[in-house]
Image (cartoon, rainbow, N blue to C red):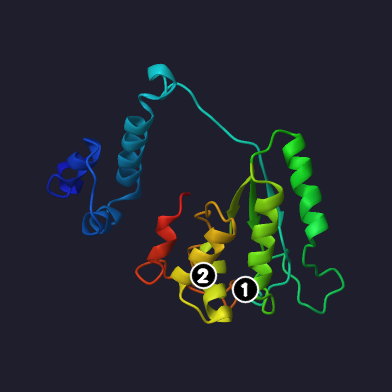
Amino acid sequence: MTEETSLDGLGQKVCDGRRVDQAEALRLYSLPLEDLGALADRRRQLAKASAYDGQGNQIVTYIIDRNVNYTNVCNVYCKFCAFYRTEKDDDAYVITLAEMDRKIEETVALGGTQILMQGGHHPKLSLQWYLDLLSHIKAKFPQVNIHGFSPSEFIHFREVFGLPLEEILSRFVKAGLGSIPGGGGPGRAHETESPHRRRPRISPDSSALAHLPR
């Protein structure tokens, strides 16, 4: 990292493993991607160093999980998307509890410990539908982490449910949500995208998303 991009010693603070506050994190965000990546890798090395009897930086771990799409109905209509369907399409679907159970049982049988659950922006699924789905999975498969819903889905939930993100997240977590993926945040302005694409605006009004592990 160059002195020019060290942000008056903030880079060294990160490299030393010291905690940064919100304002400092925003300053780090302005760094070139390669510098920000180098800082992130340094923090990873510090965090992993003592794991596995001091061999944490020589050992790579992984989990077995499965992607489960709970619906392909979406009202965003991105032009490049071959996945979405409208409610009127013959092959549109909303997953049933029995189908979800089967997919998770197959995952567990292979040693899986997590599902990544995402779907389209369905305009009619209720808040209670999602809460019932999460609580059903958690009750039947307590050993499986539910890693679910992209930032753009949470923006959709906020609009459809008419509730603050913090409340939606709180209720989802209580129902069984364990973590959220980071994908789906960028709202690219491009002619191949739908004019209905939500720009997630993760900060500051979506700051509650950061409180879940990723």
Residue 25 spot, x, y in % from top left? 27, 54
**Contact? badges 1 and 2 (CB < 8 Å):** yes
Residue 115 spot, x, y in % from top left? 65, 48
| Residue at the spot of label 1 | 127
Q: Amino acid at mark 2?
A: Ile
- Image quarter for residue 152? bottom right
Determine crowd level at label 1: few under 14, some 14-19, many 20+ residues with C-alpha closer than 10 A: some
Residue 172 spot, x, y in % from top left? 56, 63
* Residue closest to the eye, 16 or 129: 129
Q: Residue at x 54, y 60 (%)?
A: 174
| Residue at the spot of label 2 | 168
Helix, strand or loop status at disc 2? helix
Position of 3 compared to 137: left or right?
A: left
Residue 134 spot, x, y in % from top left? 65, 59
Q: Quadrant of the N terminus?
A: top left
Q: How many numbered badges does the structure rendering display? A: 2
Measure the C-alpha gap from mark 1 to mark 2: 8 Å
Q: Residue at x 79, y 41 (%)?
A: 106
